[in-house]
Image (tube, rainbow, N blue to C red):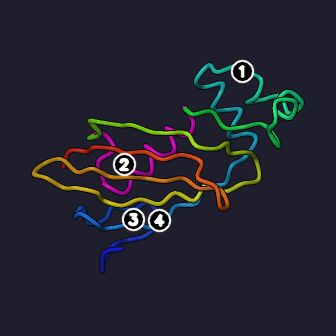
Amino acid sequence: MCPDQDAHGRPGKLHPGCEFGRVHVPVTATQIIAGTLATRDFYPVHHDRAFARAHGNADIVMNILTTNGLLARVVGEWTGRGAGCVGWSRTLRAPASPGEVLRISGRVETAVEKEVVVSARAETGAVVHAEAVATVVR
């Protein structure tokens, strides 16, 4: 972290190499199901435990749109630029299930004139759930 960088989802310095305070987001069944309903993703792996387990998962799993929303919210809080995101890419690496905690960390990769590129990573235990790169306008 930069010397005076704030923690837990609060705006911080937007200089290359500065890291943001880690944000912890508990994963619950309610959150997963609400996210899938809100995004009209009715695939059973997101709400039917028997179906999810029959397809190799320990439990129901969060959908990527819910993950995107959580990562975008945290990046917006870190940068103080919730509405200033002009570019977004993400990669889903592993499932997230109820009872786990997403530990979201991030850092400023580049800052050139008005554009700042921020990377973010959501981990559960020793597993990377998702990674994202956002470009925000100062």
Residue type at mark 2 is Gly
Q: In the image, which residues are magenta?
A: 65-83
Residue type at mark 4 is His
Horizontal arrangement in the rendering, residue 32 relative to residue 93 (left or right): right
| Residue to which mark 2 is pinned | 76
At x 41% / y 59%, what residue is drawn? 106
Q: Place residue 5 in its image quadrant.
A: bottom left
Residue type at mark 3 is Phe
Judging from the image, what secondary structure is the residue with disc 1 in? loop
Between 125 and 20, the one nearer to me in the picture = 125
Query: Could you give the CA–CA distance between mark 3 and mark 4, rounded to whole angstroms?
Result: 8 Å
Horizontal arrangement in the rendering, residue 1 relative to residue 33 (left or right): left
Q: Quick one: label 1 or label 2, which is nearer the N terminus?
A: 1
Residue type at mark 1 is Tyr
Judging from the image, what secondary structure is the residue with disc 4 in? loop
| Residue to which mark 3 is pinned | 20
Horizontal arrangement in the rendering, residue 83 relative to residue 32 (left or right): left
Q: Quick one: label 3 or label 4, which is nearer the N terminus?
A: 4
Q: Nearer the viewer, mark 1 or mark 2?
A: 1
Q: Where's residue 55, x and y in %?
A: 82, 30
Query: Could you give the CA–CA distance between mark 3 and mark 1, rounded to whole angstroms?
Result: 34 Å
Q: Which mark is residue 8?
A: 4
Look at the picture and state if 98 lies above or below 124. above
Q: Which mark is residue 43?
A: 1
Figure quadrant of the N terminus: bottom left
Circle 1: is it few (<14), some (14-19), or many (20+) Cα within 10 Å? few
